[in-house]
Image (cartoon, rainbow, N blue to C red):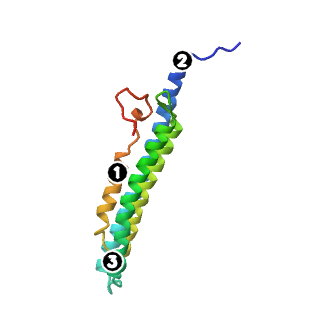
Amino acid sequence: MTTQPTMEQKERSLHILSIALLVLLYVMWAAFLLGEFSFMAVEALILAQMKTQVPPPPAPDPQNIKVLAIVHAITLVIVIPTVVLIRRFLWKRFRSRGILAPFMYAIGCIIYWAGCESVAFFGLVIALLNHSFWPTIVAVAIALGFQILGFPRLSGLRPEGLGNKSG
């Protein structure tokens, strides 16, 4: 004869699952950022070598770079708020009795990080085409800042009303 787990046992199991998920999310969060910062470091080396290259590489078309920088700024303004809203919608939609399903917390985080990363990489590619980090580094820094602020927290999985914010 099997016994049904008590509410306390269910809550403990959910807490253990939440901790395990958070560890996985920490690794993913760090891997996303490591990729961006590694690409930026390699790009900085390439750009430094371009400045000393003889003969110098052909200069990029300033009009094309201007258009790409504007598209990048628009991308930042559209993508970051969109992924914030998607994440908030998912977290509110899949909260039951004040508790967010752990897998939906993870999906919301991953969508948010992917949006931030796409803006950052787009800016870094434009910088490579431009042979300079300026002006796209501003939007790249903003996207990376939002991504860093999206660090996964246990409070995101706890029931509402326990001192955490659900968005």
Give the numbered dot on residue 50: 3
Q: Give the spatial CA distance, label 2 vs label 1.
A: 37 Å
Quadrant occupied by the C terminus: top left
Rendered position, 21 above or below 55: above
Residue type for callout 1: Phe
Mark 2 in CB contact with mark 1 (< 8 angstroms): no
Q: How many marks?
A: 3
Q: Which residue lies under the disc numbered 2?
A: 7
> Residue at position x 53%, y 25% from top?
13
Disc 3 on helix, strand or loop?
helix
- Other residues around mark 2 within 10 Å, as few (<14) / some (14–19) / many (≥20): few
Q: Earlier in the sequence, mark 3 or mark 2?
A: 2
Residue 151, horizontal then vertical, whole percent? 38, 43
Rendered position, 156 above or below 77: above
Compare residues 111 and 52 and report the one nearer the observer. 111
Q: Earlier in the sequence, mark 1 or mark 3?
A: 3
Residue type for callout 3: Met
Q: Which residue lies under the disc numbered 1?
A: 146
Is residue 127 visible in the rendered image? The answer is no
Quadrant housing residue 136: bottom left
Compare residues 100 and 41 and report the one nearer the observer. 100
Q: Give the spatial CA distance, label 3 vs label 2.
A: 64 Å
> Residue at position x 37%, y 66% from top?
72
Give the numbered dot on residue 90: none
> Residue at position x 43%, y 29% from top?
158
Is residue 45 visible in the rendered image? The answer is yes
Quadrant occupied by the N terminus: top right
Quadrant housing residue 58: bottom left
Disc 2 on helix, strand or loop?
helix
- Other residues around mark 1 within 10 Å, as few (<14) / some (14–19) / many (≥20): some
Rendered position, 18 above or below 123: above
